Amino acid sequence: MADVVVERGRVARATGARKGKSLRNALGRKSTVAFFLTLPLILLIAMLVLYPAFYSLYLATLNKAMTKFVGLSNFTFLFKRETFWMVVQQSCIFAITAVIFKALIGFIVAHFVHNIPGKKQRKWRGMLLVPWVIPPAMSTLAWLWLFDPSYSAFNYTLSFFGVGPIPWLGDTFWARFSVILVNVWYGAPFFLIMYLAALKSVPDQLYEAAAIDGANWWQKIWHITLPMMRNIIAITTLFSLIVTFANFDIVRILTSGGPLDTTHLFATWAFQVGIQSSDIPLGACVSLFMVPILAVAAIFILRDVSKRGNEA
Amino acid sequence: MSRKTLTRRQFVAATAMSSAALITAPYVRGAYAAGKLSIGFWDHWVPGANKASTDLVNEWAAKEKVEVSIDYITSNNKKIELTAAAEAQAKSGHDILQMPSWWPQAYSENLEPLNDIMEPLLKQNGEVNGTVKYLGQSGGKWLAAPATPGSQIKGPCSRIDLMKKHAGIDVQEMYPAGGPPKVENWTMETFLKAAEACHKAGFAFGIGMGETTDSVDTAGAIFQSFGAELVNAKGDITVKTDQVRQAMEFYKKLIAFLPPDAPSWDDASNNKWLISGRGAMILNPPSAWAVAKRDAPQVAEQCWTHGFPSGPKGRFAPYLPYFWGVWSFGKNKEAAKSLLVHLSSPSSIEKFVAVSGGYDLPAYANMSKFPTWAEEGPPKGTLFHYPDPYKHQTLSIAASPAPPKIAQQIYFQATLTKMALRFARGETMEQALAWAEGECEGFMRS
């Protein structure tokens, strides 16, 4: 009986010691320290991102008066609305076109800047980043003045060449062109800086070897630059796609979704439906529609990134 | 480090003495004995107009011993609507919140009924028009009190010289300062002819076809003057009627004489159009004229604000009242009501009107003849007819008389301007009407 007791005590002590040791080990691990260091940020994200996200999911299941649960009927209602499908189409046109142009312009300008010698390059980098560092609401107001029906500086300039006046924001084509243009102007510097960083990490020896093999500039881009930049291009594109899809300020300030709703994006239409028309559940539904579309884009783009990572 | 200990006997004696002192002491009313009151007012665009509100509130607070705090919330980018939505959701915020036209109805469940103050106010200041009742009442319950600051009529503001020269219309003769309007010939037909003449002369009427309130309010008054309703008072969809078709035909003709980029106009565009000297008329409260006084005095002295043209079913003017609402979850509702009574007194209303240079319009019948409107200028008397002193128009809001929760969506989705624009841009009448009907069906959600 006594043996058993002693035995049990030993076992208990041994377990306690193991537990204490494993806790010390866990606390000593770098990943645990990293977790605790990032905990404030995780909590902040939980409060400002996760909670609103789940709350909007909850709102999307309520009726207009927010008095009863209606399941998915808000979504089925949206599927029957002509304007909703127009908004889906427009959001895709807006985001895809803007991201393509931002990437293209960023890529080309990054090459130009990369080829500028040292000190001058710093000045150019600074200047080219200006659109990106100005708060978009402010710079879009300046664009609004450039497109203004009464005082448009663009139309004034074009009038010297006998062109115009162009209804920049009053005609569907021009209004879409204008909002995409402003988004490209604002977002291209982000691509530029990311691509510039990627370009700088491509070893010069590869280009030298290609030059010895007689490769022309296009072959160097196609066989060296682009493969070396693939991952950064994919991640930048995904990031920009998310931000562009969720854009609000540019469209809200320039066109408020007009003319005839032809420039509305998910966010601007959600605001109009949810806040202005006091249909918060429907507004929540509209904004939630970005999630599956972006999730599909993220899966495709990131899957490709990890594949390349494995190859490497 | 000496430490004095309190004996049980001393403790009991001290407690008894303190209690006796508290009970027998005379009641002294502190500076803020009646509690606190938090107010969210609309941030007035007229310089100095907020000060009038602050002064009136402080005057009341000093008398009533209430500690007040005021936030002035801009209506730019719908911040006041966002505030209302957030406070209604959180069931917390200001005690009093000033709300634009549709919001008392939108948050009717969260607002304290104000019948107890509205009934005496109506007796004191006179009746309010049908639009104020339509927006401010629900089932006989006053949801909010009509606010003078911000309330406005968006009637025509014409250029005297350009209208005379190009359209042959003397707006001063039609609407003489100090006298009743002579408007037998001021009809939609005359309006259209004038729009055409001014367009040909290079001074098109500055009427927006966008999705913001100025464009929608104009469309509302024009549709109503033809008797056109998308949804009637019972909530039935009435898009495919002859009246709506007539209004659409009229709009199609009018759009041809408007600036080509009118579909992209916001609420600032018409102001700029007038101030830049490019237009012979806009439909707006006197804000554009007030800015022109400062920035383009030669334009301002040619401006004349007057009534709307009449259509087959009457003369309707776009009217946008503001309201003061008291949240039902507010902490000091009695004080809030008392303040609203003070802000709705004739002397307070007169002060609001004077400080805003005549922009603010009281909702009450006996409050439309203050000297400000007769005296403001140049030209003197330019605002005389702004408050509709002879009541020759029906002050209305677009999308009424549809049930307010449906009308609000027709209004903010700009269904009226969109359907007119669709028709003008090449869709057939039936296509445009079918689209509007579909939209209205969607607005029936409850």
Image (cartoon, rainbow, N blue to C red):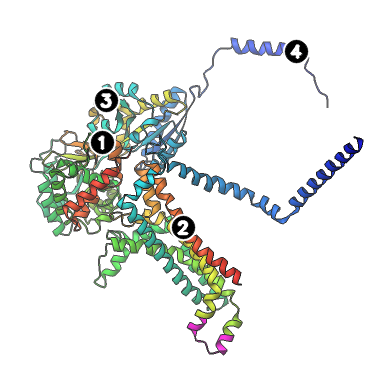
Circle 1 SS class? helix
Circle 1 is placed at which residue position? B372
Image-quadrant location for residue A292: bottom left
Q: Earlier in the sequence, mark 1 or mark 3?
A: 3
Letter of the chain that mark 4 sits on in the rendering: B
Rounded to the nearest whole Å, what is the CA distance between mark 3 and mark 2? 57 Å
Q: Are marks 4 and 3 in contact (CB under 8 Å)?
A: no
On-image quarter of the C terminus of chain A: bottom right
* A181 left or right of A150 in image: right
Rounded to the nearest whole Å, what is the CA distance between mark 2 and mark 1? 57 Å
* A2 left or right of A186 in image: right
Circle 4 is placed at which residue position? B10
Q: Position of residue B266 (x, y in %)?
A: 30, 51
Is residue A220 one of those drawn in magenta? Answer: yes
Magenta residues?
A: A209-221
Q: Are marks 4 and 3 on the same chain?
A: yes
Q: Nearer the viewer, mark 1 or mark 3?
A: 3
Tag 4: Cα neighbours inside 10 Å, few (<14), some, or many (≥20)? Answer: few
Q: Look at the image and tell me whether residue B266 can be seen.
A: yes
Q: Nearer the viewer, mark 4 or mark 1?
A: 4
Please state which amino acid type lies under the numbered disc 2.
Leu
Circle 3 is placed at which residue position? B125
Circle 2 is placed at which residue position? A294
Q: Earlier in the sequence, mark 4 or mark 1?
A: 4
Rounded to the nearest whole Å, what is the CA distance between mark 4 and mark 2? 74 Å
On-image quarter of the N terminus of chain A: top right
Q: Nearer the viewer, mark 4 or mark 2?
A: 2
Q: Residue at x 34, y 64 (%)?
A: A177
Q: Residue at x 14, y 50 (%)?
A: B250
Rounded to the nearest whole Å, what is the CA distance between mark 1 and mark 3? 18 Å
